[in-house]
Image (cartoon, helix red, strand yellow):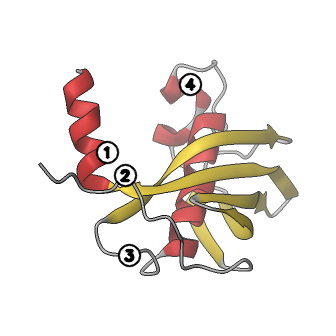
């Protein structure tokens, strides 16, 4: 039986790709809503999700059909709080490519300045095989 490849061996993207994502912080985005504290400021988990979206947008339309990218490693420093009602903008830049691994630098800012900074590594893989492997393990 032929199996779909887990991923292509060569990823046809180049360093320097950029993506961004914006969010006006609402009640559902807070640490309190995420169960991660009792303050009504942007939750770190939601902030990371915004940085992740910026990475995905940097790759939008550039990966081969049947492939996607998933997070492998995250290093994110959440440096200052963002209140409900404020807009936060996450930016991602593809810095390095090692085979299927894509290394991004990410940051997020609001009107008060830098909110977060870090690194995200994503891996390009075949969707069908990934989902089959995932479902077999369940």
Are dots 1 and 2 in contact, CB under 8 Å? yes
Which badge, 3 or 2, comes first in the chain's sequence? 2
Tag 1 residue: 130
Q: Mark 3 and mark 2: span between their CA atoms?
A: 13 Å
Which badge, 2 or 4, comes first in the chain's sequence? 2
Nearest the viewer among 4 and 35 is 4
Which badge, 3 or 1, comes first in the chain's sequence? 3
Residue 57 position in % (x across, y down): 52, 71
Are dots 2 and 4 in contact, CB under 8 Å? no
Instruction: Quarter of the image for the C terminus: give it.
Output: top left
Q: Secondary structure at mark 3?
A: loop
Which badge, 3 or 4, comes first in the chain's sequence? 4
Residue 91 position in % (x across, y down): 70, 67
Q: Mark 1 and mark 4: span between their CA atoms?
A: 34 Å
Tag 4 residue: 32
Above or below: residue 129 compared with residue 28: below
């Amino acid at each position: 039986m032929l199996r779909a490849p887990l991923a292509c061996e060569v990823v046809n993207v180049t360093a320097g790709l950029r993506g961004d994502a914006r969010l006006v912080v609402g009640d559902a985005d807070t640490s309190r809503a995420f169960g991660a504290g009792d303050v009504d400021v942007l939750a770190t988990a939601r902030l990371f999700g915004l940085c992740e979206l910026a990475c995905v947008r940097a790759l939008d339309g550039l990966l081969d059909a049947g492939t996607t990218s998933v997070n492998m490693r995250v290093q994110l420093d959440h440096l200052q709080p963002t209140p409900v009602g404020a807009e936060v903008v996450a930016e991602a830049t593809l810095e390095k490519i090692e085979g299927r691994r894509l290394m991004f630098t990410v940051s997020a800012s609001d009107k008060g300045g830098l909110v977060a900074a870090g690194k995200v590594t994503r891996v390009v893989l075949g969707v069908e095989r990934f989902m089959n492997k995932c479902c077999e393990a369940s």
